[in-house]
Every structure is written in structure tokens, then in C-alpha cells.
Image (tube, grey):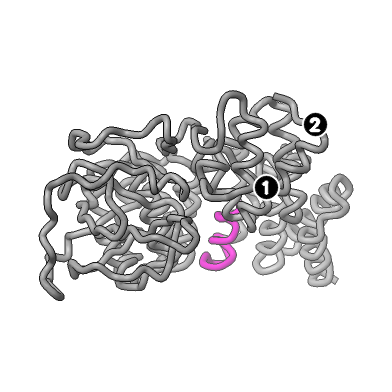
Amino acid sequence: MQLSGSECKRLKLALLNAFPNTISLEQMLLHELDKNLREIAGEGSLQEIVFKLIQSANSQGWVEELIRAACNENPGNIKLKSIAEDLLPNSDAETSSVSSPSILITESQQQPQNLPSAPQSQTRFSFPGESFDKLPQPSSQEIPEPKPMEILPRDEFFVTVDEAPEGDCKFITHVANKYEQSQVTNFSNNSLVEDKKISNTYLPVNEVATVEILEMDSRTLQENLVNIQKSGTPEQCQEAIAKTSPWLKSHPDDSYVRRQYLILVREKGELEQRQEAILDTVIWLKDNLLCDSYVFTEYLKLVTKQGTLEQCQEASSQACIWLQNNPDEPYVRKQWLVLAKDKLKLEQCQEVISQTYSWLSDNLTTCDSYVMTEYLRLNKKAGASHQCQQAIIQAVSWLEKNPDNSYVHNQYVALVNKQA
């Protein structure tokens, strides 16, 4: 499919409406298409990034995948639905699907009542708002009323389903140690978990189901961790961290859950949980050092924030080895430079500078702006005089090809002023 100019404009407006910030757009591409937004669109304002993204998809022939991915990530957005109905052949926003496990159900795909119980690997379903009135009725099996404030073991994981105004049904994962029905004040689009214990049908509105986290599939757990990070209380975040750790021991190669776990630990975990996550990751990396770049980046961020000096030094050594095998990966290289600037001793910082200088000698024209920015910052803080002079020369060459990049230019000026 090739979009016309007017169709590109419509898709741009729809994406801006559905994903109002760069992070949400980046998550959509990663979750649904396993693509890196920065590699595709580079830097700029959100409008510029969306424009470049559509240009790339249009020229490379994956516009349909982009539209389907956007609809899967934000199934309730009216503008996305409208453009999907107009542009996708023999499809609409509700029937769109990509390679991700998320499946959207339409009227023609309604499931019969009394479905068999879903096994552990059963695909998770998410429902657009207008489809909720088409759900099968609950089974005849009665759900006993919970006793007021009945306390259950803390290994119970709760999912609450409620109905938002104007029929826009959204969902939120709710971790608690009380089996009770509660009004949900925060909503999220992506967290409906099928009932595995109470009935053999979909969860009816206002019912609560318990699902053991160890029984969750990768996609469901990842979505739950994202939602808890966004809207969970500190207690909910800490409980989710505690329960995800043993899940990862049973699924050590799941990079998506491991990455989201590290993000949640870094942003919401307690000190002990952060230290435990660092130690567990160090052990895991002994056999998986050449892991996914996103996982390794989040590991470096966590160590930078909470690691001891010894842990930071070990992480720096690991990053050096990792980059020897993945020299063109900007995220890890940038975070390695940040780790050195914030946590390493002077001699170690200068060693990182020397290794980065050598790499830049062969990769200056393709160097990511964030890498160049952090390289100049590290030189300004810890570089020897000759290293700073070398960095200034490299920055001049880089800026000749990228004259409008304010981040690199500002750090270049700061380094020059230091040397003056």
C-alpha cells in the first residue's frame, strides 16, 4: 500500500491523537512491531518524528502493519478506527492484527458460551469499547459473594474490570491482598486477563478474578507490569516486583518481561529490591551477556541509579564486552557513557573515553547524537587535556554534517569553554 499526500496527513493526525508523546509511540512500535523508533525517525518534535515514521513505512511497504499495530495498542481511538476502516483492505480497526499476541474480537468472531478453560499459554484478549455489549453472558456457575474484608494470601493477583463513561470500556490491573469489589478510578487500555478460576466465559463487567502471576503468559505479564508502573500504588508495585522475580527464574530468556521488570524496579522498587534485581541480573548475564540491547540498557540504568561502586565497575566491564560484539548499538553505548560520568573513578572514565574515541574514529559520520552528547559530557567532566582536544576535533566534524543539532552543539561549546 502506498499512501497519498492527504492519506499521510490523516494518518499523521490520527497517530498524534492516539499517541500524544514520544514514549507512547515508541512503546507501540516496540510492543507491536519490534521496531526502534529512534532508528527509524531520529530526533525532533513529535510531529516531525511521526512524519518521518510514516515516510519510512510508506517507502518500505509496511504502512498496513503500522496502522494495525497502532489500532492494537490503542483500540479505543476513534481516529485510528476511522483511518483503518478506510485504508485497510477487507478489514477494519477491530479485526486488525499483527504479529503480537493481542487479538481484537468483532461481532463476526464472537466466541460461544461455555468455552473450555484456557491453558497457561492461552492468548490474551483485549476488547474495544463498543464490543463489550456483545460479550457472551456469564455462565450459570454462581460466584460466591466475598465476605467483607476477607483477607487472602498475598500471592493472589487481582484484575478488576469496570466500565468507563460513554461505553469506553478500559481495564486496570489491581494488586491487593483483599478479595473485594471496588470502584476503579484509574483506567488503562491494555489489561484484560481471562478468568481462569471462576468461570469458563469472559469476565462480565464488575466481576473480579484472581490469577496467579506464575500462570501468566509473557504478553499478559508485560502489560500488567506496564500498567502497574503507570498507575499502581507503591505497595502494588513492590508486590508485582516480588512476584515477577520468580517468574523470570522460570522464564529466563523472556527479554520483554525482564526489561519491563527492570524498569519497574528502577522507578518504583525499594532499595533492597533494586539491589536484589542487580544481583539477579549479574548472575543471569554470566550466561547471557550478549542479551537484548533493551534489557542491557535497562540494567545499566538500574546500576547507575542504585549500584555500588563495585557493581558499577563490573557493569562497565560488561558493557565494554557487549559493545565489542554490538558496536553500532547506540542505546547501550550512550548509557555506558552516562554510567562512567556518574559513577566511575577518574582513571576509569578516561579509559571509557579512549575506547569511545577509537570507535568514533571509524564511525563518526553514523554516530548517534545522544552518544556524541554524552561523550562530550564525559570529556568535560573527566577527560584529560589531550582527550578533550580530540573530542573537540571530532565534534567539529560531526557538527559539519549535523549543523542544527542543538544538544551536541551546546556540549561542544561547554567543552571548548573548559579548555579555554
Residue that mark 2 sits on: 4
Residue that mark 1 sits on: 14
Q: Position of residue 229 (x, y in %)?
A: 42, 63
Residue type (three-letter) at the residue carrying disc 2: Ser
Residue type (three-letter) at the residue carrying disc 1: Ala
Q: Position of residue 155 (x, y in %)?
A: 17, 60
Task: Please say whether residue 308 is visible from this viewpoint.
Answer: no
Residue at the spot x=69%, y=24% of the render?
A: 1
Crowd rating for badge 2 (residues with CA inside 10 Å; few <14, some 14–19, many 20+): few
Quadrant showing the C terminus: bottom right
**Is residue 114 depicted above or below 402 in this figure?**
above
Badge 1 element: helix
Q: Earlier in the sequence, mark 1 or mark 2?
A: 2
**Is residue 161 depicted above or below 40 in this figure?**
below
Task: Tell me the magenta residue range.
Answer: 334-348
Residue at the spot x=31%, y=68% of the render?
A: 236
Q: Position of residue 298 (x, y in %)?
A: 47, 54
Q: Quadrant of residue 401?
A: top right
User: What's the mark number on residue 260?
Assistant: none
Q: Is residue 355 left or right of residue 417?
A: left
Asked if the stretch drawn in magenta spans residue 336, the answer is yes
Asked whether the residues under the numbered discs 1 and 2 touch, taking CB atoms below 8 Å apart as contact, a structural biologist would say: no
Q: Is residue 349 left or right of residue 268?
A: right
Chief secondary structure of the magenta portion: helix
Q: Position of residue 344 (x, y in %)?
A: 52, 65
Residue at the spot x=88%, y=52% of the render?
A: 403
- Towards the viewer: 405 or 106: 106
Q: Is residue 311 left or right of residue 329?
A: left
Residue at the spot x=57%, y=50% of the render?
A: 77
